[in-house]
Amino acid sequence: MQDIDERAARRSERTVALLFTVSMVATIAFIAAYVALPVDKYIYVFPIGHISALNFALGVTLGIALFTIGAGAVHWARTLMSDEEIADERHPIEASPEVKSKVLDDFRAGAKESGFGRRKLARNTLFGALALVPLSGVVLLRDLGPLPGTKLRHTKWAKGKRLMNYNTMQPLRPEDILVGSLTFAMPEGMSEEQHDFQTEIAKAALMLVRLQPENIKDKRELDWSHEGIVAFSKICTHVGCPINLYEQQTHHVLCPCHQSTFDLSDGGRVIFGPAGHALPQLRIRANDQGYLEAMGDFPEPVGPAYWERG
């Protein structure tokens, strides 16, 4: 009917445009749902049951966006384009000039019959739908993870926070740290019951060693120590493994993952292995009550290379 009735052709064109417009609206709804709906919200959908509201909304809107593009293209082809079948004989891969000319003529005829140049409403809405659909994939890039910002530059250590024994959860005094021993500590106020404990302890874990002051080679390390007690980050600067092997005679600590070795008597510098830089040192002192406390946060981010630490 559309071949002989222009009013019927215009109705088909409007139908095609409506389908493409629905696709655009669905794509926008997909992005809005992705931004607005929380990941922990659940809804009841019969007969599926309780499902994630976010997943349901994303699936429905993306499905509508893709389906209506396909439906619009099929409706366009079935109602506005010629349905004449053209059969061609097999021919050599390299076409003759006559065949090339025929192909170009057929292409021009098909383009003219499709109304692609004349049916501007259908054509422009198709372009709009195809342009918006890829945005669904672009916004999904957010799931690569939240940007860390500057939060990896800071830990729970702050001026005045006491050093708590990691095993006993009691504040440490200088006399609790013996020469040749390795003690692990964490900031005051942290507990394993806190929901972010594992995240924060992965940055704030501390190891304490007591050296003879005359054995400390680095001047800043000596200034930041208290009676020979030095405090360094427990997190290896290679890939972030916890360091827990200490050699008394050499004052070296060894990371068990990839054998990076650090000299705690010389600013925590790397003396062997793949680690890229020295262990950050925490400046400590004894407060008026005789407990060890921090005099601030680490002066640099702890853990692996800079680009992994934000």
Image (cartoon, helix red, strand yellow):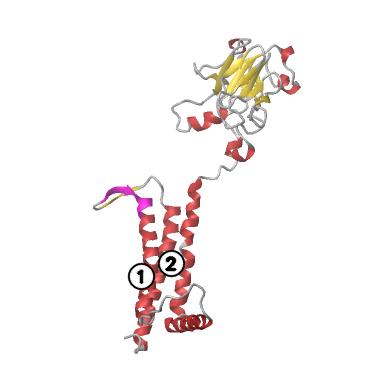
Left or right of 67, for residue 100:
right
Q: Which mark is residue 41?
A: none
Which label is found at residue 24?
Answer: 2
Horizontally, residue 169 falls left or right of residue 68, namely right
Q: Which sits earlier in the primary sequence, circle 1 or circle 2?
A: 2
Identify the residue position indicated by label 1 in the image.
Answer: 71
Task: Look at the image and tell me in which quarter the C terminus lies.
Answer: top right
**Relative to 180, residue 162 above or below:** below
C-alpha separation, residue under disc 1 versus residue under disc 2: 14 Å
| Residue 160 image-quadrant placement | top right
The image position of residue 136, as x and y in percent, is 46, 58
Q: Nearer the viewer, residue 294 or 99?
A: 99
Q: Is residue 310 shown to the viewer in this render?
A: no
The magenta stretch is 48-56
Residue 305 is situated, as x and y percent measured from the top left of the image, at 63, 36
Task: Judge whether residue 262 is colored magenta.
Answer: no
Please state which amino acid type lies under the numbered disc 1.
Answer: Ala
Does the image show residue 132?
yes
Check disc 2: other Cα within 10 Å, few if <14, some if 14-19, many if 20+. Answer: many
Between circles 1 and 2, the one closer to the viewer is 1
Judge by depth and name the residue closer to the eye, 213 or 96: 96
Q: What type is the residue that disc 2 sits on?
A: Met
Identity of the residue drawn at 49% across and 66% down: 131
Residue name at image x 31 percent, y 86 percent: 1
Give yes or no for residue 55 being in the magenta stretch: yes
